[in-house]
Amino acid sequence: MNKALTLVAKGILGAYNFLIPGEKYTENDDAELTEIRQFARKRTDISDHLATLYKEALAVQPKVIVELGVRTGASTFALSRAAEKTDAWLISLDMEPTVFHSDYEKWRFILADDIEFAKFFPEFADKTGFDPPIDFLFIDTSHTYDHTRTEIEAWLPYLGPAGTMIFHDTNMKTIFRRKDGSLGGGWNNKRGVIRAVQEFLQADWDESHEYQGMHNGFSVHHIPTCSGLTILRQKSGA
Ligand SMILES: C[S@@+](CC[C@H](N)C(=O)[O-])C[C@H]1O[C@@H](n2cnc3c(N)ncnc32)[C@H](O)[C@@H]1O
């Protein structure tokens, strides 16, 4: 799409989205969740999922959270609140620098390729002062099939026995829909992430719909909105 067309498309999406009211807060929200919901009022390609990331991270009472793919730190914003609340380490990695910053003393930003860094993760954990099992792993990087497969191979061995692993962009589309009905612009990744995740799980559901099931030892919850989020909980009965 050329620049003028992209601007027109963005203008149309913006005008359409303006007519849709934002999400209301619920009475059970803690201060952090309220803050995250406020942050998520800015509609992005991940805004639907920030509260879910926070709640799923808290659910495993993590000691170690690893996030692959930071960009400007929307997911990091949510995960840093979960880490602070549970006194967990939060390791955020991206191959590009980020403008995000946190004063939380157990937050580390790693500037590296995620596959390369995986080889040194146990050494890094040892030097930093924590044990390597990862309680919560969030993957949101290249969105491509080959890379997602390699990420699963490289990082799965570090996932703790009751750990949760979450993938974003498991329902990528040129135009995606959020849960409030608003629309956003994405790109066609040829089902790269969902294909790799489903192959790993030996499962085959329609990613354009919500789905729950047990596969390959994981309790799976797939949320189709906002480019898709797929949650793999290792904890049985979760
Ligand atoms: C979609 S953005 C991440 C969005 C972020 N989670 C958020 O909430 O805003 C994807 C990021 O993955 C990073 N990335 C892509 N391939 C990578 C790789 N092989 N290793 C590390 N980071 C990578 C990119 O630099 C980019 O910042």
Image (tube, grey):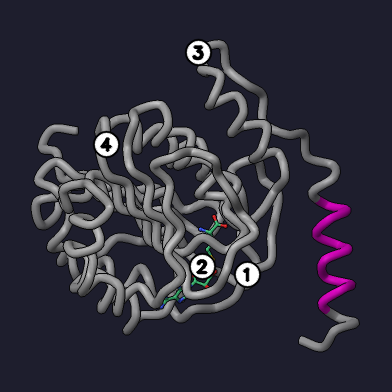
Mark 4 crowdedness (10 Å alpha carbons): few <14, some 14-19, many ≥20: many
Q: Tell me the kind of residue under disc 1.
A: Gly
The earlier-in-sequence mark between 1 and 3 is 3
The quarter of the image holding the N terminus is bottom right
Residue highlighted by disc 4: 62
Above or below for 110 versus 113: above
Q: Secondary structure at mark 1?
A: loop
The quarter of the image holding the C terminus is top left
Examine the structure image and report whether residue 72 is included in the region drawn in magenta: no
Q: Is residue 88 left or right of residue 33?
A: left
Residue 54: x and y, percent? 44, 36
- The disc placed on residue 186 is 1
Q: Tell me the kind of residue under disc 4.
A: Pro
The residues bearing labels 1 and 4 have C-alpha atoms spaced at a distance of: 31 Å
Q: Nearer the viewer, mark 2 or mark 4?
A: 4
Cβ–Cβ under 8 Å for marks 3 and 4: no
Q: Secondary structure at mark 2?
A: loop
Residue highlighted by disc 2: 172
Residue numbers of the magenta segment: 6-16
Identify the residue shown where x is 29% and y is 30%. 59
Depth order, front residue of 124/27? 124
The residues bearing labels 3 and 4 have C-alpha atoms spaced at a distance of: 21 Å
Cβ–Cβ under 8 Å for marks 2 and 1: yes
The residues bearing labels 2 and 4 have C-alpha atoms spaced at a distance of: 29 Å
Residue highlighted by disc 3: 28
Q: Tell me the kind of residue under disc 3.
A: Asn
Q: Secondary structure at mark 4?
A: loop
Residue 221: x and y, percent? 31, 46
Does the closest atom of ligand 1 sit within 8 Å of the Cβ of label 2?
no
Residue 137: x and y, percent? 30, 53
Asked if residue 229 can be seen in this view, the reply is yes
